[in-house]
Image: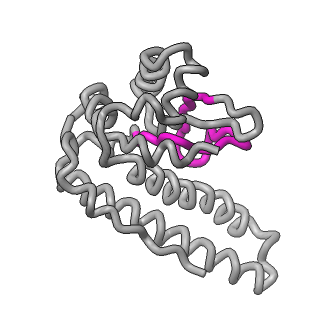
Amino acid sequence: MEYSAKEYNYLKGTPGFSDSLLENHFTLYQGYVANTNKLAASLFEMMAEGREATPEFAELKRRFGFEFNGMRLHELYFGNLGGNRLPDKQASIYSLIEKEFGKWDEWEKDFKATGKMRGIGWVVLYQDVESGRLFNQWINEHETGHLAGCEPLLVMDVFEHAFISDYGLKRADYIEAFFSSIDWQAVDKRLK
């Protein structure tokens, strides 16, 4: 079974994100989908040929995590864009954030500070499925730093491709635009 790239053209016109930035970002995402499919096919073929004990197989296996997570993280990222500034205060996500961080502003401060850290990667608000607790986590590249047993609720791309054509090196301005465009209903639906 091959993965198909999802359609996110409905995000065009989102305040703070130019259509050209979004189009380029969609193209990058489509590349992750294509590479995930290519790697899956190559790995299957190598297994069928008995080549699973080779260095090439090992490298493709490692690369698969990068491409697959690049695909999924972009889907989660695009899926939580296109909304407005704050969730309904009656929403489950709002209540849980207030419970975990003491107040909304403290959570937001922590999430934004994580996003402003130097380097490329992602910021993810995770829910520990076992305990229900929330954590803001930095993900380096796509495959390093994920919290095992946790569900991604809110995903922010902080690779330069997500903002540099609109904001230059002003990552903080991009983060503000991101916060103004979060679809909190989508985030709320991800709660377990």
Query: Which residue is nearer to you in this view: 43 or 75?
Result: 75
- Residue 159 locus on image (x, y percent): 39, 41
Query: Which residue is nearer to you in this view: 28 or 111?
Result: 111
Query: What span is colored magenta in the figure?
Result: 134-157
Q: Which residue is drawn at the image coordinates 60% and 59% (left, top)?
A: 63
Query: Which residue is nearer to you in this view: 3 or 47?
Result: 3
- Residue 153 locus on image (x, y percent): 54, 42
Q: Which residue is drawn at the image coordinates 79% and 73% (left, top)?
A: 52
- Residue 182 locus on image (x, y percent): 35, 40
Farthest residue to the front: give it.
90
Residue 81 in view, yes or no: yes
Is residue 32 positioned above or below 77 on the image? below
- Quadrant location of the N terminus? bottom right
Q: Is residue 151 magenta?
A: yes
Residue 161 in view, yes or no: no
Q: Is residue 135 magenta?
A: yes
Q: Which residue is drawn at the image coordinates 23% and 51% (left, top)?
A: 21
Q: Within the image, what quadrant is residue 120 found in?
A: top left
Is residue 48 positioned above or below 152 on the image? below
Q: Secondary structure of the magenta portion, mostly?
A: strand
How many marks do you count on the picture? Answer: 0
